[in-house]
Image (tube, rainbow, N blue to C red):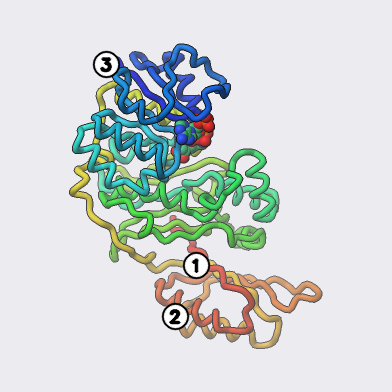
Amino acid sequence: MSRALRIGLAGLGTVGSQVAESVLSGVIPGVSLSAVCARDKTRDRGVDLSTVRWVDHPNDLAEAGDVDIIVELIGGTGDPAAALIDAALAAGKSVVTANKALLAARAMHLAVISEASGASLAYEAAVAGGIPVIKTLREALAGNKITRVCGILNGTCNYILSQMESTGLSFDAALRDAQALGFAEAEPELDISGMDAAQKLSLLAGLAFNIQPDTSLISVTGIEAITDQDISYAGEFNSVIRLIGLAAETPEGLVQCVSPMLVRRDHMLAQVKNELNAVMLEAQPVGQLFLQGPGAGGGATASAVLSDIADLAQGFGRPIFGMDALQMEAASVCALPPQAWYLRLALADEPGSMATVTQLLAQNGVSIEEVVQRSRNAGDTHLPVVFITHKVAPANLQAALDSLAQQDRISDQVLALPVFEA
Ligand SMILES: NC(=O)c1ccc[n+]([C@@H]2O[C@H](COP(=O)([O-])OP(=O)(O)OC[C@H]3O[C@@H](n4cnc5c(N)ncnc54)[C@H](OP(=O)(O)O)[C@@H]3O)[C@@H](O)[C@H]2O)c1
């Protein structure tokens, strides 16, 4: 049976104004909007807030007597978002947030104070926008043993990579397109460096594997080095390139990485295009699940925020990571298991170059499954060569890359991308 729930909403931007509009429309019975806060009181939010109290500082919401729960949609890892969430949880008020950056940075601190006060911290919107992956892991799969979580967790990178693939655009042109369409920030480093995906992966790994989320343990490679040539070579291997976040149990431990990977065209993740996100979950006894949907945008993100609000209205709260925070284990760094790699290098166009490279690879235990060498354009001194290796242990691959880096027949750094294992 639901109980009346009064919301204090901090942030009335892309997501917050959509949440305000939905709550005011009465979409969730018994839930009302008591007070709101943003920086500029005079700004038109496209929603009639004349019946809602305005407060000047986010922290006023934590203290307000007519506010039962806080919805934090300001963003950022520092104050005022951090102070507001701390104050609300300490006061026993549950919090709904979409702020993955803050959660990833302060996950354990927040889990501990939320458990101490008995207030919930709900964050469905913080990972993969409108895709209900947090609830799927924490609730729907509560009786399963999760073995692998992987997916496309950043819509900006996916837009850039899939536009490069479908239109032949360069990385820079695809990024400019994404910015013009609002799929990339004016300062896109957090997205294209892979860090945004790593923040989300750390939260998924925490939930799936009962470990303390820690982005510093995730091996992170961004998409900045991917060229239109890589996209085209990947096509020759019947593959596309996607930025994949992966957390998986292996015999050596829990692997956590974010990297552009070659994905076979016939795999579900290869079909995920543009700004969409997707998450693939593997668990026992359920098997494999695949969730796909909009990973960002006001409507999709508000949808996830509203579902958390509806849960709290039903009195339904859970520990942040589905278990007692003090029992969550610290994770450690674990290298990828042996696997195939895509290697792209620029090789001097002179006799013996290819033999030198293949010898160096062989000496380090790296065997080649496929190779593509492009013909020479007039004036080129180096030719692009691409290898797909057989499965190789990470230490061998690194030794081979170190040897290649000493070679003056190779210009520039060798690009090494994992081949995604279905
Ligand atoms: N947008 C998405 O697609 C998306 C997707 C997933 C998650 N998220 C997360 O959702 C959260 C909100 O994102 P958003 O895109 O809605 O951000 P946004 O459009 O930039 O809105 C931020 C809001 O916070 C307010 N604000 C900023 N500083 C403040 C301060 N010092 N005091 C009071 N209010 C302040 C702003 O006020 P003014 O309007 O007056 O400037 C604005 O209303 C972030 O954590 C973001 O990471 C967003």
* Badge 1 amino acid: Trp
Q: How many marks?
A: 3
Q: CA distance from mark 1 to mark 3?
A: 55 Å
Residue at position x 22%, y 45% from top? 325
Dot 3 surroundings within 10 Å: few (below 14), some, or many (20 or more)?
few
Q: Are marks 1 and 2 in contact (CB under 8 Å)?
A: no
Q: CA distance from mark 3 to mark 2?
A: 64 Å
Q: Position of residue 206 (x, y in %)?
A: 30, 48
Q: CA distance from mark 1 to mark 2?
A: 13 Å
Residue marked by disc 3: 3
Q: Are marks 3 and 2 in contact (CB under 8 Å)?
A: no
Residue marked by disc 2: 365
From the viewer's perspective, tell me whether residue 285 is left or right of residue 226.
left
First-in-chain label (1 vs 2): 1
Residue at position x 62%, y 84% from top? 408
Residue marked by disc 1: 341
Query: Can residue 126 be seen here?
Result: no
Question: Quick one: 343 or 192, which is closer to the camera?
Answer: 192
Specify the quadrant of the image occupied by residue 57: top left
* Badge 3 amino acid: Arg
Whether residue 187 is situated above or below residue 320 in the rendered picture: below
Q: Position of residue 237 (x, y in %)?
A: 59, 62
Mark 3 vs mark 2, foreground winner is: 3
